[in-house]
Structure formats: C-alpha cells, structure tokens
C-alpha cells in the first residue's frame, strides 16, 4: 500500500472533581460546543458528546502522532478554563484527575 491510513476512534470519559453534580443543563450545551471546538482545533475529529451532571463521554478520533493523554489534558484544561471564565458556578470548576479511554 503506497499510503498510510489510520483511524483510531476512542470513547473518552472524565468526571467533575469530587463527582459533584456541577454541569448544569442551562449551560451544558455551550460546554459541549466548546469542547467540540477544542477537538477540531487540534485537527482531530469530533463525533459526539454527552454526559451527566458529574461526568462527560466523548467520541473522537485522533491522528497517530497525537498522544491521547495530551489531547485529554488539553480538553480538560481548556474546558475548565471556559467554565470558570463564564462564571457558571460560584466556586472554581475542576475536572477530577484521570480518565477512561476505550477504543473501537
């Protein structure tokens, strides 16, 4: 085969610090759109997002040179910064350490 093709689809799950029910229905759609933009901004492919007030599920595919841990670090850092800049909560919003990642 003259060219290389790779598609790695991964479900990513991460939770709000302390598993607090901090993600409100009033602003979750804005958060989801923001996370979509972060994934697309790194030239990776975003498929879908959903979750509960205490955690998120994303389905993305990423290019082989991308380290999954770096992508998730960027997603969590950028999205928590977004929530805090928007002042959606009275306290500081943080994601819990760690994540789940399942390839398909």
Image (cartoon, rainbow, N blue to C red):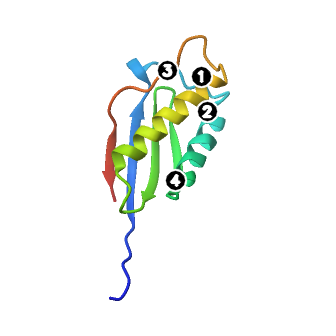
Whichever of callouts 3 and 2 sits on the residue coming sooner in the sequence is 3
Counting from the top left corner in percent of width and height, residue 87 is at: 65, 19
Give how far apart the Cα atoms at labels 3 and 1 are: 16 Å
Residue at 47% x, 23% y is: 94
Residue 21 circle label? 3
Q: Which residue is mark 2?
A: 28
Give how far apart the Cα atoms at labels 4 and 2 are: 22 Å
Give how far apart the Cα atoms at labels 4 and 1 are: 22 Å
Does the CB distance between marks 3 and 4 fall below 8 Å?
Answer: no
Residue 84 circle label? 1
Counting from the top left corner in percent of width and height, residue 55 is at: 45, 31
Residue at 38% x, 44% y is: 70
Question: SS of the residue at dot 1?
Answer: helix
On screen, residue 18 above or below 6: above
Residues 24 and 70: in front is 70
- In this rendering, which labeled residue sits more in front, label 3 or label 1? 1
Counting from the top left corner in percent of width and height, residue 3 is at: 38, 83
Give how far apart the Cα atoms at labels 3 and 4 are: 29 Å
Whichever of callouts 2 and 1 sits on the residue coming sooner in the sequence is 2
Residue projecting furthest to the front: 65
Give how far apart the Cα atoms at labels 2 and 1 are: 13 Å
Question: SS of the residue at dot 2?
Answer: helix
- In this rendering, which labeled residue sits more in front, label 4 or label 1? 4
Q: Which residue is mark 4?
A: 42
Question: SS of the residue at dot 3?
Answer: loop
Counting from the top left corner in percent of width and height, residue 75 is at: 48, 40
Left or right for 91, reference 58:
right
Residues 72 and 51: in front is 72
Residues 83 and 11: in front is 83
Whichever of callouts 4 and 2 sits on the residue coming sooner in the sequence is 2
For residue 99, which quarter of the picture? top left
């Amino acid at each position: 085969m003259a060219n290389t093709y790779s598609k790695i689809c991964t479900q990513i799950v991460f939770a709000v610090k302390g598993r607090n029910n901090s993600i409100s229905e009033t602003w979750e759609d804005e958060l989801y759109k923001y996370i979509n933009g972060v994934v697309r901004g790194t030239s990776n492919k975003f498929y879908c997002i959903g979750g509960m007030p205490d955690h998120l599920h994303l389905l993305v595919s990423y290019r082989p040179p991308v380290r999954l841990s770096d992508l998730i670090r960027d997603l969590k850092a950028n999205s928590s910064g977004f929530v805090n800049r928007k002042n959606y909560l009275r306290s500081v919003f943080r994601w819990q350490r760690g994540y789940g990642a399942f390839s398909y």
